[in-house]
Image (cartoon, rainbow, N blue to C red):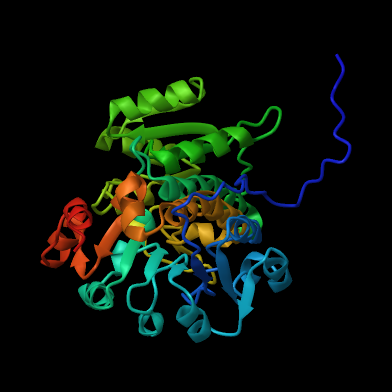
Amino acid sequence: MEIPSLQGFTRESGLMTMEKPLKKSEEHEALRIGVPREVANEERRVSLAPSGVSTLVANGHEVYVEQGAGRQAHFRDDEYSEAGGELVDGPGDLYSRCDLIVKVGPPDDNEVDLLQEGQILISALNLGGTEPDFLRRLMNLKITGIGFEFIRDPDGTFPLVRMMHEITGSMSIQIAGRYLESNEGGKGVMLGGISGVPPATVVILGAGVVGEWAARTALGYGAHVIVLDSELGALRALEHYLDRRITTAMASEQYIRQAVRSADVVIGAMMSEDHRSPMLVTEEMIAEMTPGGVIVDAVMDQGGCVETSRPTTHSDPVYRRHDVIHYCVPNMPSNASRTATYALTHVLVPYLLKIGEAGSINEALWQDEGLRNGTYVYRQHLTKKSLATMFGMPHRDIELLIASGI
């Protein structure tokens, strides 16, 4: 069979976005979009890759990029300028020029001071660190705040959250494999084993997106994979997706204890929507693990699901408890900053184009369910019931606000 020639096909040492320029509608609004440098501790991602900037500029938008914004994800300033973006010296200049700010982490106090009245802010909200005063400051400025965690499409998926969870699941296995090595103080076991030597046993707590991608990656290494979850349907679905190459069990105390005792690696991936992760693994269970085993608690941003877990950082990621290595970094995708930036770009650019095509943020929210679901503050009102309940604040329904034109 003849194989088509790949001559002339070039591939960057990374990922390329798939967005294409869209035809402008009569209502098209040229947006001034700002991409600031992230200032949060150890945040290495940037909200848009140069390829995303190129797509936005091709659709008639202006994109301002703070100098050095992509440095930690290995995007050079000249790549942004060649893509059509305009480089600005500092955040003050950037915020003052733009009507829409797109960033990874929520703005800190200094950045909130730079926000302009009526601006659109698209970023993660990071519920664990959100304070009611932050929300009030946004509302006083009449900011339209759209949070990554809340953007939910009509099919029920959370596209930005899912992208980051896929990265987290895959990374958790890479990390576990590294810390199993003797040089890192692990028991000196290969995830996949070799001929005549059995593979490592990887126990994954949770069959959601993080757990699924951890299981896929562990299978790719050749590990023996056990997945536990409290929902039988989730386990059945994962067995189907992975062609029954995993062992599944209900997350009862008995099964968890048995699995953890036999594990070389435990991946904490159990999540609970709008709540803290359930605490599934007790300290007593950890004490029964073989010395040199590894725990990667991949849901530390939700509190973790292992009793002995405590948050760590990329600069100091591990500690030992009961001679078991614990890796508990909450912001794992930041350490795959280039891949994560491309992932963000894939999802964010189409939403930005929709806002421009709609002609106004009011019309964009009315037309697009994902953006509407993602909005948490709008025209001096809190629009998320979950946040209102959390902080004891009043809220207004976003659809009624849009319809009334308030």
Where residue 154 sits, quadrant-wise, is: top left
**In the image: residue 223, left or right of residue 132:** right
**In the image: residue 197, left or right of residue 111:** right
Quarter of the rendering occupied by the N terminus: top right
Q: Residue at x 49, y 58 (%)?
A: 332
Q: Nearer the viewer, residue 183 or 54?
A: 54
**In the image: residue 233, left or right of residue 159:** left
Quarter of the rendering occupied by the C terminus: bottom left
Residue 231 against residue 188 in the figure, above or below: above
Q: Nearer the viewer, residue 323 or 154?
A: 154
Residue 264: percent from left, percent from top = 50, 43
Query: Quick check: can you spot residue 107?
Result: yes
Query: Quick check: can you spot residue 294?
Result: no
Residue 141: percent from left, percent from top = 28, 77
Q: Nearer the viewer, residue 257 or 41?
A: 41
Residue 393: percent from left, percent from top = 12, 67
Which residue occupies the extreme top position in the image? 1
